[in-house]
Amino acid sequence: MSTSAPVEVPDGLVASYGRAFGDEGRDWIARLPGLAGEMLERWELRRDGEPGAGEASLVLPVVRADGSGAVLKLQLPREEVDAALVGLRVWDGDGMVRLLDHDPDSGSMLLERLEPRSLASVADDDTAMGVLAELQARLVAVPAPQGLRALGDIAAEMLDQVPRAVTALADPADRRLLRAWASAVTDLVDEPGDRMLHWDLHYDNVLAADREPWLAIDPEPLAGDPGFDLWPALNSRWDDVVAAGDSARVVRRRFDLLTGTLGLDRRRAAGWTRGRLLQNALWDIEDGETALDPAAVAMAEALPR
């Protein structure tokens, strides 16, 4: 496929940017085909397949001048992109997709190409969670560099939002639970940790690779306690967990695998996981929700006290 072929932006990405970023997002989407052409030319890349997209990025499979495969990732420059670049540089391919090049002005990244098969394809949940836990243990072993967002600041901001958020919940039981999650954060906020967290490590963000059997992708790094990083893994393939019945057993089994492999104090890890449930609930309430997510309630009930 020629580098000069126009890039078609998937409809889902167009809609996602309109919802998330309004006029700024629509303007960026309008410029995206031109940006893609510019980066293809600058890095001497040849397109090698159809474009893909997530909620926030366009992904183009490409071939480099030396014949090796890679992926061109294009996204609106913002704080999360800057943090991702920090993480990719510091991890430098250790359990993580490797950053091959980047353009600081546009936020464009050239990444190692992985296989289009995620950890969600592994049927046995213990096997899949074991792989994820081993990767996560490697990632959080790295001290966070200066300049990353800090969990202590995030936790303090969450606690400031709780009094108003509680009033938005219609069910008294939901209000009590939100306060309980806030109490767990209050107990831990003075010891927020200093590890570099992925912040979104779930089955779909672990892909098969040639260099290693599995590698993590799409980090959203921050500095903090690894216990705050468990929720995405616990929530992986949640619809399947619910459909199979006994979701509490699955949550407890996953929690045991994660905390055992990462060597975490179970009580602290449970507390920070409740903090993650609090964060998600605050975002939902900000978006107009008046009830807690049933999945979050079920997970909270399954966590150790």
Image (spheres, rainbow, N blue to C red):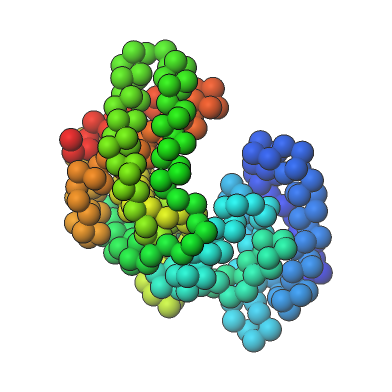
Inspect this view and state whether residue 293 appears: yes
**Residue 82, position as x, y percentages in the image:** 59, 59
Inspect this view and state whether residue 236 appears: no
Residue at 64% across, 39% down: 20
Front residue of 139/202: it is 139
Q: Seen in the image, is 240 located left or right of residue 6?
A: left
**Residue 21, position as x, y percentages in the image:** 68, 40
Residue 123 placement: quadrant: bottom left
Q: Seen in the image, is 31 located left or right of residue 91?
A: right
Residue 19 placement: quadrant: top right
**Residue 269, position as x, y percentages in the image:** 26, 46
The quarter in which the N terminus is drawn is bottom right
Residue closest to the far bottom: 66
Front residue of 151/207: it is 151
**Residue 305, position as x, y percentages in the image:** 18, 35
Q: Seen in the image, is 52 located left or right of residue 226?
A: right
Residue at 75% across, 49% down: 29
So how many labels did they put on this image?
Answer: 0
**248 over 215 or under it: above or below:** above
Residue 241 placement: quadrant: top left
Residue at 73% across, 78% down: 44
Residue at 59% across, 56% down: 81
